Image (cartoon, helix red, strand yellow):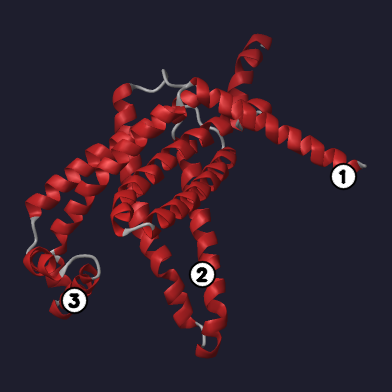
Amino acid sequence: MAVPSRVGTALRTIGTVGARTVLAAWRQDPFTKAAAGAFWLTLSLPPLLLGLLGCVGYLGDVLGSPLVEQLRTRLLALSDTVFTHQVQADLIAPTITDTLTHGRGEVASVGFVLSLWAGSSGISSLVDAITAAHHQQAIRNVVWQRVFALLLYLGGLVVAVVALPVLALGPDLVGDLIPQQWQHETARLISWFWYVVAALVLVAALTTLYTLAPPHKLPWRRGLPGAVAGVLLFVGAVVGIRIYLGWISSTGYTYGALAAPIGFLLVAFVVGLAVVLGAHLNVVVQQLWPARPARWWRRLRLLPRRIRSR
């Protein structure tokens, strides 16, 4: 009888936490905050790509002509599967050739400046939502809030530059280290293992954001519940969106082309919504099971009593 009773208690606790999280988030209009963050982060991607394309031309001197030509061949082969032969010959091929052979410093500069502005605005929207969830929105200075968001965006770009190539190329690199006779049996295992690694990286990054965003910070582990819930919500929503896009694409090329940008915008919105709901979940967990104050904070609170006792 003890096991069913514990299961019932756990289910009631989960229901209570979920209901309080949804209610607390609903009072602060999570959809507007998620949409604002999604809008700015989506707006930062085109100028970021524009800045990267402006820098690609300078890589020819570093990487060498053979590697640049190989990259050009692969890009043309990829575009041939998407565009018609006439469009590729008149527009795509000259653009790719010019981009890979001539650097555009002015394009890269403007692109990166616009990306920093839009990306920091998106991070600022999410930081505002997390701070409001903790009821600490009036503590941090407005100017410092924007500078803080810019620093977070730059840090996120650095982490993405390091982590994304590793996550993308990791399975192939690990597969090359395995003996030839075992590669077929271990390919699926490595693929699933890399999904787990990617999920753990997302959880760690989101937990760090939840820890750094509020002015009065909690221990890092206190951001884990919201980060795990946010990643699960994001993964579930992405799976649903992929099913939707697959069904729409099966009805015809026209509807598939129209559904692709809708799916991208939905994914961006789900990212913002997952961050906002995860922040409110962390607040509810803190309310139900308060974190123990740090040792220095306990000493600071006891200092007036010690002074009075003397």
Q: To which residue does mark 2 refer?
A: 191
Label 1 with label 2: CB-CB less than 8 Å: no
Question: Front-most of 70 and 75?
Answer: 75
Q: Residues within 10 Å of mark 2 (few under 14, many from 20)?
A: some
Image-quadrant location for residue 115: top left
Label 2 with label 3: CB-CB less than 8 Å: no
Question: Front-most of 18 and 223?
Answer: 18
Q: Is any atom of residue 291 visible in this view? A: no
Toward the bottom, the furthest residue is 181
Q: CA distance from mark 1 to mark 3?
A: 63 Å
Question: Front-most of 301 and 303?
Answer: 301
Which of the two labelled residues, at mark 1 and mark 3, occupies the earlier sequence position? Answer: 1
In the figure, is residue 181 to the left or right of 20?
Answer: left
Q: CA distance from mark 2 to mark 3?
A: 28 Å
Question: Front-most of 152 and 171?
Answer: 171
Circle 2: residue type: Ser
Above or below, 39 against 49 in this view is above
Q: CA distance from mark 1 to mark 2?
A: 36 Å
Give the x, y percent position of residue 226.
56, 39
Q: Residue at x 54, y 30 (%)?
A: 280
Toward the right, the furthest residue is 1
Task: Give the quadrant of the C terminus.
Answer: top right
Label 1 with label 3: CB-CB less than 8 Å: no
Q: To which residue does mark 3 refer?
A: 73
Q: To which residue does mark 1 refer?
A: 3
SS class, disc 2: helix
